[in-house]
Amino acid sequence: MQYAGIYFDTIQKLLAKTWDSQKEAMQKAVDVMTACVERGGLIHVFGCGHTQILVEEVWFRAGQPSFISPIFDQGLWPHNAPHKGSALEKLEGYGRVIFENHDAKPGEVIIVLSNSGRNAVPIEVALEAKKRGLTVVGITSMDYSTRVKSRHSSGKKLYEIADIVIDNGGPEGDAIVEIPGLKQKAGPCTTITNAAILDAMLVQVVANLVARKGSAPVFVSANLDLPADANEGYIAPYLSRIHHYKG
């Protein structure tokens, strides 16, 4: 278990470094998210490819708030053909169409996740969100993004567009463990750091809402011995805008 241990040790150090270095940026994001929700607004979350896992992480899950509006696109999921998804992520115009068909209002917040920050779709989603008057929080790998060129005609990368930038600490290429005899590194890391960043910020937003309003709409696990409709009251205020709740 030598290399499994190396992976655990590296992840723990990366999480600690991310917290120490990104606390200020995370605080800024928490402040705008708290203000948005207090006004009755939604927090929108978008990612491509495997980064859509992070959108699933924060939506309709035990311990997460019900004011999260996920932006899913089936074409971008790796399980619907990874080559197709990868090609679509680079297709200029596709991100604009995705965002145009999403219910987002001025004054709300969108979190856009992209490790490289270079592909057309996350860049376009961020650009279109800014045009509509949303605050854009970009979660990206600065080590990765600063080493590659933009694949969008603007020449910009996500960190150059976002109002608030949070560095997930991932290295160029994402993998972190060197194994003798293997040319490339193994063990991706940013799913873990991205999830930690998102979850930590949302916990603080919830805590802020409880301190200011006395409560917050946080889902409980459907596998607890609770009434079947335990979460329905948390969903109700957002049914008209978050269409994924209806299926």
Image (cartoon, rainbow, N blue to C red):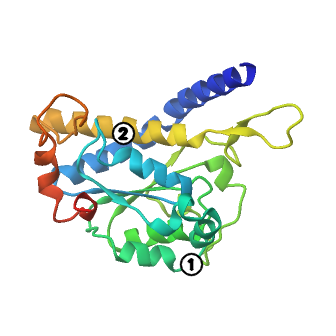
Q: Which residue is mark 2?
A: 201
In screen coordinates, is 146 left or right of 247? right
Quarter containing the C terminus? bottom left
Query: Residue at the spot x=57%, y=30% of the render?
Result: 17
Q: How many marks?
A: 2
Q: Does 42 sit left or right of 12 as displayed?
A: left
| Residue 96, quarter of picture | bottom left
The picture places residue 28, in percent across and down from the top left corner, at 37, 45
Q: Is residue 17 depicted above or below 234 in this figure? A: above
**21 vs 98, nearest the viewer:** 98
Query: In the image, residue 72 lies at what x, y percent?
Result: 41, 62
The image shows residue 162 at horizontal and vertical percentages of 47, 59
Q: Is residue 11 above or below residue 88?
A: above
Q: CA distance from mark 2 to mark 1?
A: 31 Å
Camera-side mark, 2 or 1: 1
* Residue ID for mark 1: 92
